[in-house]
């Protein structure tokens, strides 16, 4: 079974090399639905090429976009209109968050790059009263439910790639050129640590090897 699954994953990797699509960007519209129609200051941690930061800027007074990779930050600046209320900064999620309180903090596929509980504690410190934190993360498959959801996502993943590329070969989006790292925590471990740092946080497994976390500051 393991050998068969490995073959399927390798075939899927070859397919996505021809028909790539950004699994993280798939959740951007969902993230926006968790947020108010208008808000003041926003922080996007692990901002990559700036796709989500630009969406947030349509609602926010200003957006701070933070990413540890200087190359992708430079590219994000190039892709963003000079008049957009976004400041792109090279920095670490634990030590370089621009000072102040934020009405919205988002973090997509980046929190597993740093110590998890420490990162959530930093986000909590910088979240304004009544503010909203939204995390889309990746976890290590461990439970039967994890493996079942992952298996169900394989055909849907291929279908989405075909639909998003309209059946045509394509180059990798800029958003997919940032460095990546495999997840080491299981979903159950994530839930346990998150609820210690953020009591009442809402976490859910999602398709395409992702989970979501939503929390509001009191």
Image (cartoon, rainbow, N blue to C red):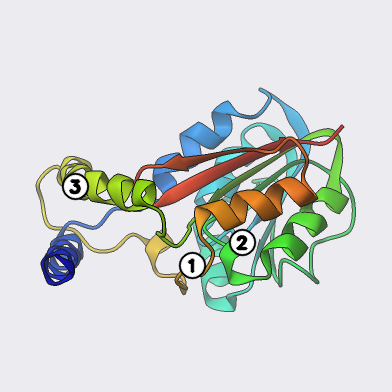
Badge 2 element: helix
- Residue 111, which numbered label? 2
Of badges 3 and 1, nearer the viewer stands 1
* 98 up-or-down from 178: above or below: above
Q: Decide which of 10, 101 is in the foreground and name it.
A: 10
Between discs 3 and 1, the one toward the N terminus:
3
* 134 up-or-down from 77: above or below: above
* 108 up-or-down from 56: above or below: below
Is residue 24 visible to the viewer in this orientation of the structure?
A: no
Dots 1, 2 in contact, CB < 8 A? no
Between discs 3 and 2, the one toward the N terminus:
2
- Left or right position of 122 against 2: right
- Residue 165, which numbered label? 3
Residue 187 rendering spot, x and y as whole percentages: 52, 53
Residue in the picture at 37% in, 46% down: 145
- Residue 150, which numbered label? none
Residue 10 rendering spot, x and y as whole percentages: 16, 70
Badge 1 element: loop
Give the position of the N terminus as an image quadrant: bottom left
- Mark 2: few, some, or many residues within 10 Å (few <14, many ≥20)? many
Of badges 1 and 2, nearer the viewer stands 1
Q: Which residue is mark 1?
A: 183
Could you tell me how far apart the alpha carbons at marks 1 and 2 are, in whole angstroms?
A: 10 Å
């Amino acid at each position: 079974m393991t050998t068969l699954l490995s073959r399927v994953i390798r075939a899927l990797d070859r397919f996505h090399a021809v028909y790539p699509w950004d699994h993280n960007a798939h959740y951007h519209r969902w993230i926006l639905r968790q947020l108010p129609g208008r808000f003041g200051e926003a922080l996007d941690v692990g901002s990559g090429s700036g796709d989500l930061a630009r969406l947030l800027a349509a609602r926010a007074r200003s957006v701070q976009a933070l990413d540890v990779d200087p190359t992708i930050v430079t590219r994000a600046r190039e892709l963003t209109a000079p008049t957009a209320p976004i400041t792109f900064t090279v920095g670490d999620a634990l030590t370089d968050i621009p000072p102040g309180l934020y009405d919205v903090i988002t973090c997509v596929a980046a929190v597993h790059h740093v110590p998890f509980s420490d990162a959530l504690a930093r986000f909590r410190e910088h979240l304004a009263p009544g503010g909203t934190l939204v995390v889309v993360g990746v976890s290590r498959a461990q439970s039967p439910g994890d493996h079942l959801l992952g298996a169900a996502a394989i055909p849907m993943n291929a279908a989405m790639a075909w639909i998003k590329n309209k059946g045509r070969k394509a180059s990798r989006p800029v958003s997919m050129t940032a460095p990546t790292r495999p997840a080491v925590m299981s979903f159950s471990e994530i839930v346990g640590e998150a609820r210690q740092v953020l009591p009442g946080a809402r976490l859910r497994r999602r398709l395409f090897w992702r989970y979501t976390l939503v929390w509001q500051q009191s």
